[in-house]
Image (cartoon, rainbow, N blue to C red):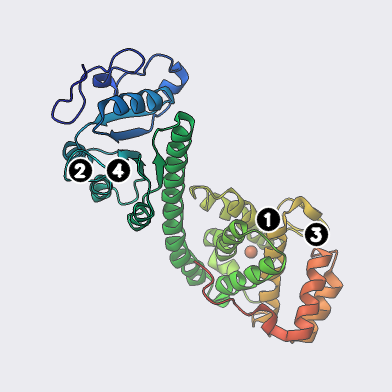
Amino acid sequence: MIESMGGRVDQPLGSGAAALDSTRARPSSGFSVDAARRERPRVLVVDDDLGVLHSLCGILEGAGFEVVPFSAAAEACTCLLREAFDLVVSDLYLDSDLLGYDVAAAARGREPAIPVILLTGRPSFGGAQEAVRSQVSEIVVKPVEPLSLIAACRHAIATARNERRQRRLEAQNRVLASVLPRAIEAKDPTTSGHAERVVCYTDTLAARCHVSESDRAKLRLASLLHDVGKIGIPESILTKRGSLTAEERGVIEEHPEMGRQILEPLEDSEEVRTWVYQHHERWDGQGYPNRLKGDEVALPGRILILAEVYDALAEVRSYKPAWENHRIVEFFRAQAGSHFEPDLAHMVADGLERQGSRFFAAAPGMLF
Ligand SMILES: [Fe+2]
């Protein structure tokens, strides 16, 4: 006979399922050694029907989850306030005053983004509405089909992890976006506003070239940070009036590599580093630091190369006035296939000819 002790099931549930008092420490039989070595997602399972609880534990442990089972909702809620879990699986209608939604609310008291899957043998429209209101990840209808339950659990955990990662990256990007461009401009005030304008130009071009949303987000960050390596260049060279010596030019040409190194700790941002590193390459292979040619630089990187030059031409610099639009159009046509990808250069030249600088007008709500 299976008994619950204080709600948490602390007795072995018999053959075929794991010994539940050791779910934290030991994998069940049939569980591979490799899986045991991996980090096992922790799942708190609540069901007042011990037969169902037994079977849920067997299914989830067999799929590699660490399961902490409860037959009483109140005890489960107390545990959820104390311990961290990756997922909660709860019966909707429990043998108490509490419902699965209450278990979900308790779980969110500690971890607001924890995924919750509710099980019910009585699906209803009202229940579905309540699930949406309570932000339940999924409702699984009993009798539970093992593969569907495992898939739902894995999907809910993966989605929650992705969302957490995304939030972390966005927070990181907001910090970078607010701090680093100012640091570059403090060093070289002649380029004030350059990075923000380049973000606007690259995003406009990326949208016109149907670059994917995720690459556009990375390109915005790369555009904002493309000159971050200038932090490592002496101010005497950065702000020098007149032409640079060959040696000084050599120092300046180190800034893409320095930028890549500065951005090394950026999580999940290989493309950002790559496009920053490549922003002085040219279509004809005459750029630096690696003389890459043609599509050796990916489209977002080619967009950044062009946008950066557009800003240098369109704005006043210590060594030149702002160029008029017709002169920039001529320049892009002349450089199509040499400095710039030909299609991109002609697209920009056509756009500037038709609309002038409005061609690069920022989309509202852009950036980060
Ligand atoms: Fe640069």
Which callout, 3 or 1, points at the residue further toward the start of the chain?
A: 1
Of the two numbered discs 4 and 1 on the same chain, state the one appearing first in sequence: 4
Q: Residue at x 29, y 14 (%)?
A: 14
Q: Is mark 1 within 8 Å of ligand 1?
A: no
State which tag comes first along the sequence, 3 or 4. 4
Find numbered disc 1 in the image and state the secondary structure of the residue it sits on: loop
Mark-to-mark CA distance, 4 and 1: 55 Å
Which of discs 2 and 3 lies nearer the camera? The answer is 2
Determine which of the numbered discs, if any, sits on residue 243 in the image: none
For label 4, the residue is: 92
What amino acid is at disc 2? Answer: Leu
Of circles 2 and 1, the one toward us is: 2
Q: Residues within 10 Å of mark 4 (few under 14, many from 20)?
A: many
CA separation in Å, label 3 and label 4: 61 Å
Image marks 3 and 1: residues in contact by CB distance under 8 Å: no
Callout 3–callout 4 Cβ contact below 8 Å:
no
The location of residue 261, given as percent across then percent down, is 55, 49
Residue of label 3: 283
The verdict on label 3 being within 8 Å of ligand 1 is no
Q: Hey, what amino acid is under mark 1?
A: Gln
Q: Name the spot of residue 304 as percent of width and height, x first.
A: 67, 64
Residue identifier under label 1? 278
Q: Residue at x 34, y 18 (%)?
A: 17
